[in-house]
Image (spheres, helix red, strand yellow):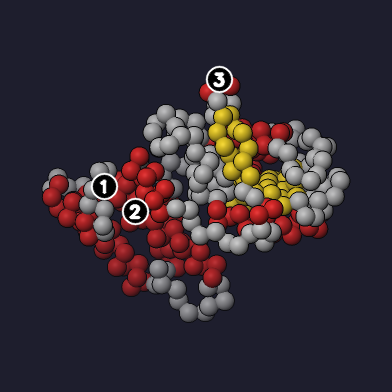
Amino acid sequence: MNRLYRKNKKHGAPKAYPLADKYGPFYFDQPVDHSDTSAGTFKHRYWANTDWYQAGGPVILTNAGEADATPAARFVTNSSMALLAENLQGAVIIMEHRCYGESQLGNDYSAQNLLTLNTETALADMANIIKNVKLSGIELPPAPETKWIVYGGSYSGNLAAWMRYRYPEIVFAAVPSSAPVQMKYDFYDYFYPIQKYGSKPCIQAIEQVIAYVDDILFGSDEAQKQSLKAKFGVEGLEYDDDFANLLMYPLGMWQVLLNRCVADTQPMTV
């Protein structure tokens, strides 16, 4: 985990889209542990747009979810959230999830620094920002006088729905998109649409590769495992399930490709 932390620092943040300095990033002093103030605070990164805000307007909030929030920062000016804020004369806040991007609790990914990386704490982080964040240039009445609308998609959508459920006294509404709020430990169902709608030759090739890789990883030949990992440039990767997850990652791009190919009548390959 510490090697992963150093790798992320070495390669830097994901691509940032041009965004005026007035939108951030800003940093909020967030408790490391909401049940223990002696644990201190960390710098919780967020971006905000108050260009359209008028007294009485809402605040649109989203937690960017399980990734560095740098690419999502542009949503404060270019998104459905921004359009809603403009029409309702409100503000937009994009906050980073703790333990991702620059919102780190320490200098490594040790168990101690990841101890509070859980859904309950993420919700408490959002509630604390709703209750205490100060936005430059505007006076923001406390909730529920100010109506807070929580947005999100996928896991971020889960957080939006759960915020409305858990904190109804401060969350006026939630807009969760594609939010799997019924949590499953092994969500293999996610890949069924790929098997069903993907190009048949492509799917057959992927299934053959999966069978080949599984045969090696579930076997006992360590040299063969390391040889396989070396083909993907990760011969030093210790855990086989981490390697399997690495190979699985490109399949997650199906939903991105699907959005880009809606108007395409040709069969789509994976």
Depicted 125 relative to depicted 221: above or below: above
Q: CA distance from mark 2 to mark 3?
A: 38 Å
Query: SS for tag 2?
Result: helix
- CB within 8 Å, label 2 to label 3: no
- Residue at 53% over, 73% down: 261
* Residue count near mark 1 (Cα–Cα under 10 Å), binned few <14, some 14–19, many ≥20: few
Q: Which residue is mark 3?
A: 38
- Residue at 49% over, 34% down: 105
Q: Is residue 23 left or right of residue 236?
A: right
* Residue count near mark 2 (Cα–Cα under 10 Å), binned few <14, some 14–19, many ≥20: few
Of mark 1 and mark 3, the one earlier in the sequence is 3
- Residue at 81% over, 58% down: 87
Q: CA distance from mark 1 to mark 3?
A: 37 Å
Q: CA distance from mark 2 to mark 1?
A: 10 Å
Q: Amino acid at mark 1?
A: Leu
Please tell me which residue lies in front, 10 or 1.
10
- CB within 8 Å, label 2 to label 1: yes
Q: Which residue is mark 1?
A: 237
Q: Amino acid at mark 2?
A: Leu
- Residue at 54% over, 70% down: 260
Query: SS for tag 1?
Result: loop
Q: Residue 62, image x and y in percent?
A: 64, 47
Query: SS for tag 3?
Result: helix
Q: Residue 155, image x and y in percent?
A: 54, 47
Identify the disc placed on residue 7: none
Q: Is residue 194 left or right of residue 42?
A: left
Quarter in which the N terminus is drawn: top left
Q: Picture quarter containing residue 28?
A: top right
Identify the disc placed on residue 246: 2
Farthest front residue?
A: 21
